[in-house]
Image (cartoon, helix red, strand yellow):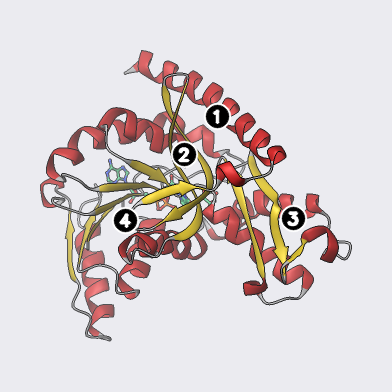
Amino acid sequence: LKVAFIGVGKIGQTIAYSVIFDGLAKEAILYDIIPELPEKFEHELRHAIATRGLDTEVIGTNSLDDVNNADVILIMAGKPRKPGMSRRDLFVDNAKIQIDLAQKLPPRNPGAIYIMVANPVDMMASVFMRFSKQFTISTGDQVETMRLRSFIAKKLKVPVNKVSGYVAGEHGEDAVVLWSTVKVNGKPFDEVAKGLSKEEVENYVKSIPGEIIRVMGGTTWGPATIIKDIVRAIALNEGRVMSIATPRTYQGEIVHISVPTVVGAEIGPSLEPVLPQADKERLNKAVEDFYKVYKENLDHLLQTI
Ligand code: NAD
Ligand code: MLT
């Protein structure tokens, strides 16, 4: 697989490292606008690759001309939020970057699949797809899904592989835990919760990235490994169910909302039709809310560019 990494700051670097060290990329293209950054990062990766004798070809570049014929393109280009900010506050700045990339990347990369990582990630995926007309997914709530499982495992003192369940909706404050899917040792959450409240779990999932950002300056290892797994599912045609956001049309606009979805060489189908009615209603509400905020931001942006 030829994989392009657009924006190799904090999260871009960790994703590139993870993808390469899982042996998923025959070729890795590292692109950023900061002079010399991709080139020096290329050296770092080459040194790391030498330890294993991997045969990945790595190219670090400041020229989009070198980003060509990629199979998978991950977009991490954009500002990260600072403590106290919402991801949505990044909309205008990061959407401008996506609109620019949406015009430049597709002609050089026919048939590529795009994976949006920059925040607000679902809205950035919608913006990129609107302007590029290329199939784009958002890493969405797969990150929340793993945060949910890890927290329940820790609190209930069970191995994390005994915890299943998904978070859906928007990546961020409005994420929706699909409680009907949450099981510990195959038993519904309510039967095993032992005083752990749903509210505590939901609070953790929504607040922990902000806490990590406050202390560590950004989230990296968690999301990078999870996002690498999305690339892995595509590259190895795993057919793994992951809560990523795929495009759907709502009121004439492309919108991205996470739902557990089969991820392989093909993306889909989603498991939305088999979710209980209550979960479907919460998801429909998430689509409605997303559309409202997205449309407001988009219309405002379109007036300014
Ligand atoms: P960062 O500032 O460390 O890196 C961003 C990089 O993007 C910088 O190197 C910058 O030069 C580059 N960039 C800016 N404009 C560019 C352009 N037009 N073309 C190419 N590169 C460009 O920030 P970070 O911590 O790596 O976060 C990057 C983005 O990813 C943020 O929006 C952040 O919120 C998001 N993020 C998302 C997830 C997720 O789960 N989806 C996880 C972590 C971070
Ligand atoms: C995350 O959830 O780790 C990312 O979206 C970064 C952030 O929280 O802003």
**CA gap, disc 4 and disc 3:** 32 Å
- Earlier residue among tags 3 and 2: 2
- The answer, for residue 143, to whether it is visible in the render is yes
Quick one: label 3, few (<14), some, or many (20+) residues within 10 Å? some
Q: Which mark is residue 201?
A: 3
Give the amino acid type for the residue marked by disc 1 in the picture.
Phe
Q: Quadrant of the C terminus?
A: top left
Where residue 75 appears, x then y in whole percent?
33, 47
Q: Which residue is mark 2?
A: 122
- Earlier residue among tags 3 and 1: 3
Q: Which residue is mark 1?
A: 290
Q: Which residue is mark 4?
A: 8
**Circle 1 SS class:** helix
- Earlier residue among tags 2 and 1: 2
Residue 26 picture quarter: bottom left
**Circle 2 SS class:** helix
Q: Is residue 225 above or below residue 257?
A: below
Cβ–Cβ under 8 Å for marks 2 and 1: yes
**CA gap, disc 1 and disc 4:** 28 Å
Q: Residue lying farthest top?
A: 303
Give the amino acid type for the residue marked by disc 4 in the picture.
Val
The residue sitting at 22% across, 63% down in the picture is: 1
Where residue 254 appears, x then y in whole percent?
41, 28
